[in-house]
Amino acid sequence: MSQKIILLIESDTVLIEIIQLIFPEYSYQIKVEQFSADIINKVNFIKPDIILIDSHVSGKHLTITTHLLKQHRCFYKIPIIIMSTDLQVEKLAVAAGADDFLTKPFNICEFEDKVLKYLNQHDLSF
């Protein structure tokens, strides 16, 4: 089995460091992008098993970014989790077509469980 890749689209350097500390025990590779521009090329190059997107990095383009990925013939199965401090994050995630959401600040155990759940589901879909 190849090493799992998590694509993290996030600008908060502290949160990036925390997330990078969570997954080494699983030998997952974390690829960080600070902008969602040119997402199709980034995903094509990185080939992630899951995508975590901060809603503020994507801004008003969050829905467009997520729809582009979910409508792409090669990427539609990749789970996408939207992360946001916005209390309406669930509504944002549904509108964007994401698989799930996390409200920041989030519980580390909840975050880890959610990401692992989708990575394990992703294993079964191929």
Image: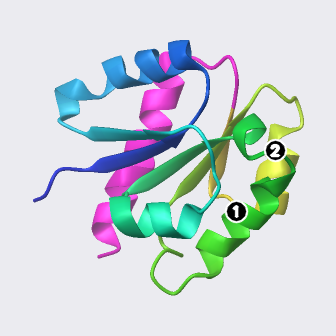
Q: Are marks 2 and 1 in contact (CB under 8 Å)?
A: no
Outermost residue toward the left in this view: 1
Q: Which residue is mark 2?
A: 59
Circle 1 packing at 10 Å, graded few (<14), some (14-19), many (20+), is many
Residue 53 horizontal/vertical position (percent): 62, 44
Name the quadrant containing residue 17: top left
Rendered residue at 67%/58% (across/down): 98
Q: In the image, is 14 to the left or to the right of 54?
A: left
Q: Which mark is residue 125?
A: none
Rendered residue at 30%/28% (across/down): 23
The quarter of the rendered structure image containing the N terminus is bottom left
Q: Which residues are magenta?
A: 103-126
Name the quadrant containing residue 15: top right
- Residue closer to the observer: 38 or 23: 38
Q: Is 5 included in the stretch rendered in magenta?
A: no
Rendered residue at 57%/55% (across/down): 80
Circle 2 packing at 10 Å, graded few (<14), some (14-19), many (20+), is few
Label 2 vs label 1: CA separation? 10 Å
Q: Which residue is mark 1?
A: 65
